[in-house]
Amino acid sequence: MDCQKIIRTLKHKDFIKVANDGKWFENGAAIYAKEIKENIFLLFIILKDIDIDNIQALIAHFDCFNSIGSKKPEQIMFHLSIKDKDDLHYFEQYLKASAN
């Protein structure tokens, strides 16, 4: 799965692109976030070289939506480095299991 397809999918699934103003994420990283519970967010971080080896998925607690991209999360509950299609499949299965 290519990075542009992932970005189109994120936008279609109501993820919001967040400004990367802080030092926690690499300079130039694109951050897409969606609140899944109160102050718990699902994030996809795509590093500037847009290589599939450089996509991270996180479920993290932030004090508010506006602190994403400017502050470190208060807690990271899940982290996945996406390196191939199987990683996306495993992440999808994790989300389905956690919704039940």
Image: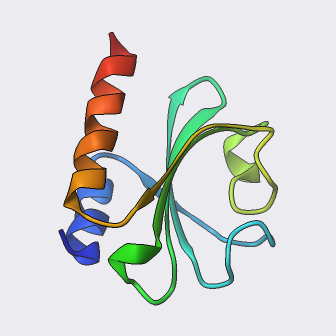
Residue 23: x %, y % from top left: 81, 72
Is 74 on the left or on the right of 77, as rendered?
A: right
Above-or-below relation of 77 to 34: above
Residue 33 in the image, given as x and y percentages of width and height: 51, 50
Which residue is at 73% across, 39% downward? 62
| Residue 66 in picture, x, y percent from top left | 72, 50
Position of the C terminus by quadrant: top left
- Residue at the bottom extreme? 49
Residue that appears at 68% across and 83% down:
27
84 on left or right of 48: left
The structure residue drawn at horizontal position 76% and vertical position 46%, both measured from the top left corner, is 73
Q: Is residue 70 visible?
A: yes
In front: 30, or 75?
A: 75
| x, y percent for residue 65 | 67, 44
Name the residue located 28 percent from the left edge and 24 percent from the top edge: 96
- The part of the image, by quadrant, that contains residue 75 is top right
Quadrant (top left/top right/bottom left/bottom right) for the N terminus: bottom left
